[in-house]
Image (tube, grey):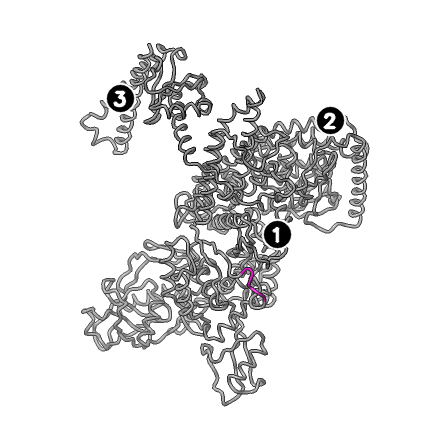
């Protein structure tokens, strides 16, 4: 491992640069030492990087060399030669331009030289200009250029630059804020917040929380204390200087921006929208202010809220997990709903939590143990291993929480629960005991899904069904060679006492060692004579009956089926019906048992041996390809074996009926209702649930096997439930056992079950265990309001929560279930690592290069061949990588996609389109702020003097409010996104803002114009403020950033954040007018017709008069009323309404706008008609030649035989297009000739 020697001084920006660069290469991060390097290394200065052995040729000294090496390792030095050159250029700028002047300004702290300060501002303005169109200095993500320049300006930002400076350096401030909020910067610098002291010449102070690292020495602490003292003196000096100046000269900082100001809302909006700038720090502020807590704004949550309560618990993600797009979809929907309910004034709680993920976590820690210490869990022992798991959980387990915060999830983190926490563990224990005491949980020996690698039963959801089309070789853990699947082996059983034989077929030939019967259909005439007969097992003296059972498919193969009751689910049921022997031939490790010698084979070695033995005996018939489904353990990739094991089961018959009836009777609503069929199918045909898992990590089953030390009591067997008792403590279990067997407690010996409970058991009681059931009152937040999750876990989780909620609390855990679709890639394929289409949402948020995507594959556990296949998939789908889209755009896209039924085919390009939508919002608010002016004061209500444009946009705003309100109530997220998108983009930006520009340009002409402009500003403000509130639940970051820039209607009482401001409702915004909408729809059809005519005649900049011939006087009056809007939006010189009997001047191009209006665009005198006709004549000639050539080609006798069908279709389409274009050219020529 490499070693990095750095300075311990917190302001040594050269060492900070090296440390930040190191954070960007996590797989090869060097060990860090805050000491001078050994003299033997001849290192010239710190930072110094020692590679490997420490010989002279493996030592790098100096910030540039060290950071360049580390940036190359972390792929942060530029993706090609051009970018690498640009990175070097910026490093040179940092070293030669920024560092000298920064040092000159900062270090003479008490005697600031104005010349140095002026020089610093000059250099920073150069940087500001370069950053104007960019988020980062080089490329679309952080590079060494950003690290080098950001560390060079760190000290000026910490000690020198005041708000007035930062206001000038808008782009530098935006970029710097974005950089220092990157996780890698935060790890080194600590989290940096901006504090503003309201008052005169407010001074910017950086408050830095200590970065993670080794504890500081006493000398370091003394040095920092001196530095703080020096800084305080400097600040006092600046405040004294400020007091001597005019007291009213400085801007007042609005108190609602709070003492901890997370984003700079004092400076002007940056020129362009940057997701990383906008999303850098709002979340910390929201969380710190307590906006996500149900207690916010209330004295007590137990007090009745007339607006109601909204409670939803998160589907607890696995503690081992990291976000994928399925999580992103879940959280985008859930957070949008939570924020909407919160803004409606309801007492709102979205409860976070994390699942202990029994198998997944145990596998991760076992691999870690083996990799780092060469030990298995058995080497450690159960208690020590569980300690290791807790250690891992405490170090790594909150990663998923940080990722959820990055998505903007407004969860009440103070209520975060872990399923292994004492409170939840007690609830799990209590649930088991109560259900066991009632007889609902019982002991039985049945077939389970068994993973030999994990030595545990696994649930159905942990079994992947791998479809094979025929013979396939698959890798199996523990086997050097791949194993053959997808073949059907036929062999014969001899009929006892005859020369006959019965041919059967199987895909698992090794299981014939456990066969105990052959089954045929009762109606199969081929086998009627064999009733009561037996067949002989070729490898032992076992005689097996021929049984007649309806489950046999007479048309498949020979119509005879081998029966292995102990190793096949269907055969198990046949065995039960016919009272057959159950012979288990596999142990927990997949080794053969209870078979004729030699019996040391593993299951797939036995496959080859059995096949050969059948051939040797002449009983083998054939082997052929067979499409089949192979069950694969999703955790270990092992082939799942059905295995007979004594386990604990939950009797689900009555609970399943209750759950089905709750939906049938309308007590529980499932949305969308096309999932009802699945629900009833599962609930009405539910099987008992196996809840035992052979693991160490999880909730150990509180059941004890009883041995009675009394000769009068018969010894029990493991599968006999009578010999099992459960208890909260061993003493309680002992008392139960003594009472059951009527002996004294001292004669009872107990052995606790080694197994743990299925993870879904603890998840099943999650909605009430998080509130302290059974010890605490559930009245406030239980039952919950809603459960939102993916439809793929409707049975595994949702059904079990409903069943256990009804069983243990007597109440449904929630009133509604909303099931979203499953995310697939743009081609409709399931997300799979081997296809290279699994996308981390954080990569969509921050962007990632193609090389970065490839690097993730290289670091994964994929087979080398699969890595290459996945790389090709990534190269095809993301040839330039994934661009930075931002959290808001990702959330908006995911919500917009939910209309696609059961699956979502997610196209990253569409997400990028919504980033452009954010940019449109940004520009609209930036324009509006300039238009409103610094002294604008919003009014409380409409004044009644609104223009037709004002009334129209307010009508459209009210319509959007109504659509969003109805759609949120119906969980119709695409309707919400469409309503908001259309309002902002097509109505506010494209129409209203353009139509009112003349009003603002003439605002100072007279008092009437001033009044019109004032009314227009009030309307514009209302649209912005309400439009942002409509969008806030889905795009929380950009709406907060823009909302904070707007003035308030009631500054003293309005809430401090858009996230706790009221959501617009139809009672307040009731200005929707169908008449106004209808009129404007007509006007826009006229505008579009004029624009189309202008495009036809290539009038890009020239304005022309437009004569609108109307069918009646009412239409003419309407056109006159909206003439200014038509003129502005169509870029016309003048709008002249005409009635039907008024003549139209000559020289006009004509187009029909509707049955009520014809557009006549005056072209005479604007364009050179003869020149245009000549152009069209040339074009007409070219088109005719093309068509003649194409017609000649298509009319050849051998054209249809020789030319491919696809080419024939293309030729026909070309001919059709050319014909259409020729007709348009002729029409245009006729129109021009009329003007001549």
The stretch of residues the image draws in magenta is 776-781
Q: Quadrant of the C terminus?
A: top left
- Which disc is residue 118 wearing? 2
Horizontally, residue 1229 falls left or right of residue 668, namely: left
As for residue 777 lying within the magenta part, the answer is yes
Relative to 526, is 361 above or below?
A: above
Q: For the residue carrying disc 1, how many other residues have a C-alpha within 10 Å: few (<14), some (14-19), or many (20+)?
A: some
Reading the image, the residue beneath label 1 is 296
Q: Of residues 143 and 756, which is closer to you in this image?
A: 756
896 falls in the magenta region: no
User: Marks 1 and 3, how far apart in space?
Assistant: 73 Å
Query: Does residue 658 appear anywhere in the picture?
Result: yes
Asked if 858 appears above or below 1164 in the picture, the reply is: below
Q: Quadrant of residue 101?
A: top right
**Residue visible at 19% across and 72% down?**
528
Is 1152 or 442 nearer to us in this picture? 1152
The mark total stands at 3
Residue that badge 3 annotates: 1187
The reply to whether residue 85 is in sight is no
The earlier-in-sequence mark between 1 and 3 is: 1
Residue 782 image point, x, y percent = 53, 61
Closer to the chain start, of discs 2 and 3, is 2
x and y, in percent, of residue 732 in the image: 57, 78
């Amino acid at each position: 491992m490499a070693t990095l020697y750095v300075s311990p001084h917190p302001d040594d920006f050269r060492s900070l640069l090296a440390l930040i660069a190191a954070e960007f290469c996590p797989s090869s991060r060097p060990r860090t030492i805050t000491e001078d390097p050994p003299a033997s290394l001849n290192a010239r200065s710190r930072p110094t990087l020692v590679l490997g052995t420490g010989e002279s040729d493996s030592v790098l000294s100096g910030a540039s060399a060290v950071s360049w090496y580390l940036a190359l390792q972390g792929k942060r030095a530029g993706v090609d030669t051009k970018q690498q050159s640009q990175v070097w250029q910026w490093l040179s700028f940092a070293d030669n331009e920024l560092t000298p002047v920064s040092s000159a300004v900062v270090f003479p702290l008490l005697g600031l030289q104005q010349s140095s300060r002026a020089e610093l501002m000059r250099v920073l303005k150069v940087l500001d200009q370069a950053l104007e169109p960019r988020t980062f200095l080089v490329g679309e993500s952080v590079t060494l250029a950003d690290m080098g320049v950001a560390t060079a300006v760190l000290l000026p930002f910490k000690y020198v630059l005041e708000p007035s400076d930062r206001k000038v350096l808008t782009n530098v401030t935006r970029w710097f804020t974005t950089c220092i909020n990157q996780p890698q910067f935060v790890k080194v610098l600590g989290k940096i917040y901006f504090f503003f002291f309201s008052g005169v010449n407010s001074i910017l102070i950086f408050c830095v929380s200590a970065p993670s690292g080794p504890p500081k020495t006493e000398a370091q602490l003394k040095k920092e204390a001196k530095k703080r003292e020096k800084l305080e003196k400097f600040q006092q000096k600046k405040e004294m200087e400020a007091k001597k100046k005019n007291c009213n000269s400085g801007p007042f900082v609005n108190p609602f921006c709070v003492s901890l100001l997370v984003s700079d809302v004092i400076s002007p909006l940056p020129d362009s929208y940057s997701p990383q700038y906008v999303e850098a720090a709002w979340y910390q502020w929201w969380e710190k202010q307590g906006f996500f807590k149900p207690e916010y704004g209330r004295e007590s949550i137990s007090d009745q809220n007339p607006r109601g309560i909204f409670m939803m618990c998160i589907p607890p993600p696995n503690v081992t997990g990291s976000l994928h797009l399925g999580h992103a979809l879940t959280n985008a929907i859930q957070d949008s709903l939570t924020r909407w309910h919160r803004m409606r004034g309801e007492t709102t709680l979205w409860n976070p939590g994390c699942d202990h993920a029994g198998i997944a976590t145990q596998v991760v820690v076992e691999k870690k143990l083996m990799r780092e210490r060469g030990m298995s869990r058995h080497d450690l022992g159960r208690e020590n291993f569980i300690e290791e798991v807790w250690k891992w959980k405490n170090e790594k387990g909150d990663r998923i929480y940080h990722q959820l915060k990055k998505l903007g999830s407004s969860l009440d983190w103070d209520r975060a629960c872990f399923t292994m926490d004492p409170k939840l563990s007690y609830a799990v224990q209590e649930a088991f005991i109560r259900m066991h005491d009632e007889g609902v949980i019982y002991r039985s020996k049945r077939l389970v899904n068994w993973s030999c690698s994990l030595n545990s039963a696994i649930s159905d959801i942990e079994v992947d069904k791998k479809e094979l089309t025929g013979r396939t070789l698959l890798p199996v853990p523990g086997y050097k060679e791949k194993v053959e699947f997808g073949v059907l082996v036929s062999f014969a059983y001899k009929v006892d006492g005859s020369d006959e034989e019965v041919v059967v077929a199987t895909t698992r030939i090794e299981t014939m060692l456990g066969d105990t019967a052959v089954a045929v259909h009762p109606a199969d005439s081929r086998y009627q004579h064999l009733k009561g007969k037996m067949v002989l097992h070729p490898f032992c003296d076992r005689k097996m009956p021929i049984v007649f059972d309806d489950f046999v498919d007479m048309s498949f193969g020979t119509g005879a089926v081998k029966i292995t009751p102990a190793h096949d689910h269907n055969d198990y049921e046949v065995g039960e019906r016919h009272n057959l022997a159950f012979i288990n031939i596999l142990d927990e490790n997949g080794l053969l048992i209870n078979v004729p010698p030699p019996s040391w084979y593993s299951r797939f070695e036995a496959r080859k041996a059995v096949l050969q033995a059948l051939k040797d005996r002449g009983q083998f018939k054939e082997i052929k390809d067979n499409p089949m489904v192979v069950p694969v353990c999703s955790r270990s990739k092992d082939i799942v074996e059905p295995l007979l094991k004594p386990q604990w089961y939950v009797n689900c018959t009555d609970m399943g009926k209750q759950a089905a009836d709750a939906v049938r009777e309308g007590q529980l609503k499932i949305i969308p209702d096309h999932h009802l069929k699945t629900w009833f199918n599962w609930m009405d045909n539910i099987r008992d649930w196996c809840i035992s898992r052979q693991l160490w990590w999880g909730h150990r089953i509180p059941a004890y096997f009883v041995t009675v030390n009394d000769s009068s009591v018969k010894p029990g067997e493991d599968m006999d439930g009578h010999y099992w008792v459960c208890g909260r403590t061993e003493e309680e279990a002992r008392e139960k056992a003594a009472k059951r067997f009527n002996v004294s407690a001292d004669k009872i010996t107990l052995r606790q079950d080694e197994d743990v409970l299925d993870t879904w058991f603890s998840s099943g009681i999650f909605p009430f265990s998080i509130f302290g059931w059974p010890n605490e009152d559930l009245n406030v937040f239980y039952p919950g309001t809603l459960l939102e999750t993916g439809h793929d876990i409707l049975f595994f989780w949702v059904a079990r929560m409903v069943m256990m909620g009804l069983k243990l609390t007597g109440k449904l855990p929630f009133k509604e279930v909303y099931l979203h679709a499953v995310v697939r890639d743009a081609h409709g394929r399931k997300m799979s690592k081997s296809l290279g289409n699994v996308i981390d949402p954080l990569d969509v948020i921050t962007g990632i290069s193609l090389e970065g995507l490839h690097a993730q594959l290289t670091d994964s556990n994929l087979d080398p061949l699969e890595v290459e296949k996945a790389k090709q998939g990534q190269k095809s789908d993301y040839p330039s990588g994934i661009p930075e889209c931002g959290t808001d755009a990702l959330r908006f896209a995911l919500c917009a996609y939910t209309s696609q039924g059961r699956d979502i085919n997610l196209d990253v390009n569409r997400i990028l389109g919504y980033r452009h939508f954010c940019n449109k919002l940004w520009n609209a608010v930036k324009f509006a702020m300039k238009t409103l002016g610094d002294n604008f004061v919003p009014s409380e209500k409409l004044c009644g003097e609104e223009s037709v444009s004002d009334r129209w946009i307010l009508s459209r705003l009210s319509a959007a409010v109504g659509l969003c309100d109805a759609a949120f109530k119906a969980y119709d997220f695409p309707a919400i996104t469409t309503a908001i998108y259309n309002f902002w983009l097509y109505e506010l930006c494209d129409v209203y803002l353009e139509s009112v520009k003349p009003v603002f340009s003439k605002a100072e002409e007279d008092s009437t114009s001033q009044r019109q402009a004032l009314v227009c500003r009030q309307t514009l403000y209302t649209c912005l403020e309400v439009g942002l509130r409509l969008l806030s639940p889905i795009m929380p970051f950009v709406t907060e950033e823009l909302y904070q820039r707007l003035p308030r209607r009631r500054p003293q009482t309005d809430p401090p954040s858009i996230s706790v401001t009221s959501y617009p409702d139809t009672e307040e915004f009731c200005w929707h007018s169908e008449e106004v909408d209808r009129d404007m729809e007509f006007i826009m059809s006229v505008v579009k017709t004029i624009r189309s005519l202008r495009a036809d005649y290539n009038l890009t900049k020239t304005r022309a008069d437009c004569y609108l011939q109307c069918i009646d006087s009412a239409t003419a009056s309407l056109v006159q009323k909206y003439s200014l809007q038509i003129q502005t939006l169509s870029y016309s010189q003048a709008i002249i309404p005409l009635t039907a009997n008024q003549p139209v001047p000559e020289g006009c191009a004509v187009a029909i706008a509707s049955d009520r209006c014809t557009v006549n665009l005056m072209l005479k005198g604007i364009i050179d008609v003869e020149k245009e006709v000549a152009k069209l004549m040339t074009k007409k000639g070219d088109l005719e030649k093309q068509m003649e050539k194409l017609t000649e080609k298509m009319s050849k006798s051998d054209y249809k035989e020789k030319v491919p069908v696809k080419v024939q279709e293309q030729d026909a389409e070309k001919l059709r297009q050319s014909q259409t274009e020729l007709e348009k050219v002729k029409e245009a020529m006729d129109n021009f000739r009329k003007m001549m």
